[in-house]
Image (cartoon, rainbow, N blue to C red):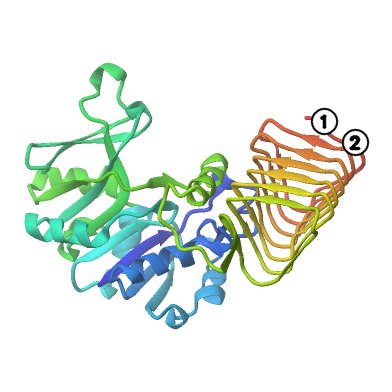
Amino acid sequence: MKAVILVGGLGTRLRPLTCNTPKPMIPLVNQPFIESMLIRLRDQGIDEVVLAVQYLADRFHTALGDGSRLNMKLHIIKEDEPRGTAGAVKNVEHLLDDTTFVFNGDVMTDLDLQAMLAYHREKQSKVTISLTPVDDPTQFGLVEMHKDNRVHRFLEKPRAEDITTNLINAGTYIIEPEVLRYVPPSQFYMFERGLFPVMLQTGDPMFGFPSRAYWTDIGKPQTYLDVHHDILIGKVRYNFRGQQIADRVWLEGDADIHSSAQVVGPVVIGRGVKIGRGARVIGPTVLGDGCQIGADAALEGVVLWDGNEIGEGATLRNCVLGRNNRIGAKTMITDGSIIGDDCSLGPENRLEHGIRIWPGTSLGERAISF
């Protein structure tokens, strides 16, 4: 079974985390998101995947190669210019010869793909769109269906009085390659505003597949943090790497944890982590490889990428740190704040209210109270 994953976006909403790292390559519980996604697809019967790439394409080649490490076949196809969702699939049409899954590369879901495929075949559909219910439909594109779940129309960000369904496009499709004849070659063309409306006009069978599977877009800072929390508290099915060393505490290799330190799960600890005297690490929290947590530091609900050094008495809560940052003693980082890579923050800074610090920034002692 084949799939195309759309990974051409710049990840602008996630900056500064994506300044040096393509959005699909950002770590999810200490593993590149795209890698965990590929493993999930492989385990559900997809053995050949095409990545439609544009931004920082070389990073995908370096990390994934030809897919053999993951026991699958992988094609990494770079776009010279943005093609849009349908245009990107049209660009790799020569690799598609049968029913194909299409995924957005920033969607985290535990959707049952085999159930969706069986549904697609039962309906003899040409395109099947996964759908998920939301609490506030006014923020999304709604998909209206007939009683047999055949798609009737699309309604983009409707007014409250116009809402007839709470089901939205969840970003997983099954297509028959023949529908790509409607997509113009070498042009920017979208599924949502191009191919799907055309298929409503032509009458090609297109069905919705409603599901209550877990679904979220990891492409915004708060949702990126939220999906970590959801994984750690068990809201979404996930196979943790490493071994469980305490109640809901997973260790990926060796770590140096001081006997007086307090670690309360759910927590994932990477290789070579050091947690100092009197430090408190409270879940849901992820510590990347090589992180060093200073004495009496307090961390809760945070995601640290590899190589961060947290100073003595620092407080981190509900925040994300990129790679190789140095956080000074008694500095406080809270409230959805995001720190890029290779930053140096001196002692007793205070960063709150979702502030974003760009890679390579240096701050002196007490330079910011935000």
Decide which of 110, 131 is in the foreground and name it.
110
Q: Is residue 58 toward the left or the right of residue 126 in the image?
A: right
Q: Amino acid at mark 1?
A: Ser
The image quadrant of residue 347 is top right
Residue bearing the label numbered 2: 366
The image quadrant of residue 123 is bottom left
Q: Position of residue 256 (x, y in %)?
A: 77, 65
Residue 83 visible to an observer of this rendering: yes
Residue at the far bottom in the pictured view = 68
The image quadrant of residue 289 is bottom right
Q: Amino acid at mark 2?
A: Arg
Residue at x 15% of width, y 64% of height: 178
Residue 186 visible to an observer of this rendering: no
Give the CA separation, mark 2 to mark 1: 7 Å
Q: Position of residue 71 (x, y in %)?
A: 40, 81
Residue bearing the label numbered 1: 369
Q: Quadrant of the N terminus?
A: bottom left
Residue at x 45% of width, y 50% of height: 234
Q: Is residue 363 toward the left or the right of residue 236 in the image?
A: right
Q: Is residue 58 toward the left or the right of residue 66 in the image?
A: right
Residue at x 40% of width, y 76% of height: 74
Residue at the far top in the pictured view = 161
Q: Is residue 238 above or below residue 234?
A: below
Find out whether the residues at labels 2 and 1 contact each other: C-beta distance under 8 Å.
Answer: yes
Mark 1 Cα within 10 Å, few/some/many (few <14, many 20+)?
A: few
Element type at mark 2: loop
Q: Is residue 100 above or below residue 223?
A: below
Element type at mark 1: loop
Q: Is residue 146 toward the left or the right of residue 292 in the image?
A: left
Q: Is residue 118 above or below residue 192?
A: below
Report the disc number at residue 310.
Answer: none
